[in-house]
Image: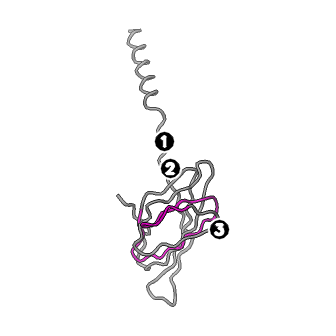
Amino acid sequence: MKLRIIAAAAIGAITTAIAGPAPAHDAERETVTPKFVQAIANIPGKSIRVVEVDYAAGASSLPHTHANSAFIYAYVLSGEVESKVNDGETRRYKAGESWFEAPGAVHSISRNASNTAPAKLLAVFVVDTDDTKLTTPIK
């Protein structure tokens, strides 16, 4: 009986040591917060949608595309963000810098450039009013 308890405890300890703590999946990704939505009165069928993207230290977005109608202006509010759009080079943008994404662009890299400090950007979409899904991960 005592041997069974010791064996069970040993197996439990070994299993815990091998498995280790499970990483929090959400901590590796960005947090997207809608900030503004407004139809553009003089351009029927178009709207402006603004989202704030927060990256924890070391966080990234999955490779993705945006709504087919989306023209996007991205502006780094704080920290530094690495970005690669289509076949362009991977660039590091600091607070106050920005870039543009054309409709149909593939955003293969979007991540916090720092493993120790957070980063934040504002993404402004000019999009068809009917396009409510702004981002689609690439598989």
Q: How far apart are marks 2 and 3 (CA)?
A: 24 Å
Distance in Å between CA atoms under marks 1 and 2: 9 Å
Residue at (51% x, 85% y) in the render: 40
Left or right: 34 as drawn, with respect to 129: right
* Image: magenta residue range: 64-91
Q: Are marks 1 and 3 in contact (CB under 8 Å)?
A: no
Q: Earlier in the sequence, mark 1 or mark 3?
A: 1
The extreme bottom residue here reads: 42
Q: Give the mark nearest the N terminus, 1 or 2.
A: 1
How busy is the neighbourhood of tag 3: few (under 14 within 10 Å), some, or many (20 plus)? few
Residue 135 percent coordinates (x, y): 43, 66
For the N terminus, the image quarter is: top left
Q: How far apart are marks 1 and 3 (CA)?
A: 32 Å
Residue identified by numbered label 3: 96
Q: Mark 2 = which residue?
A: 28
Query: With respect to residue 34, does 55 lie above or below?
Result: above
As rendered, which of 104 and 11 lies closer to the eye? 104
Coloration mode = one colour
Quickly name the residue at label 1.
23
Q: Residue 129: image x %, image y %?
A: 44, 79
Amino acid type at circle 2 is Glu
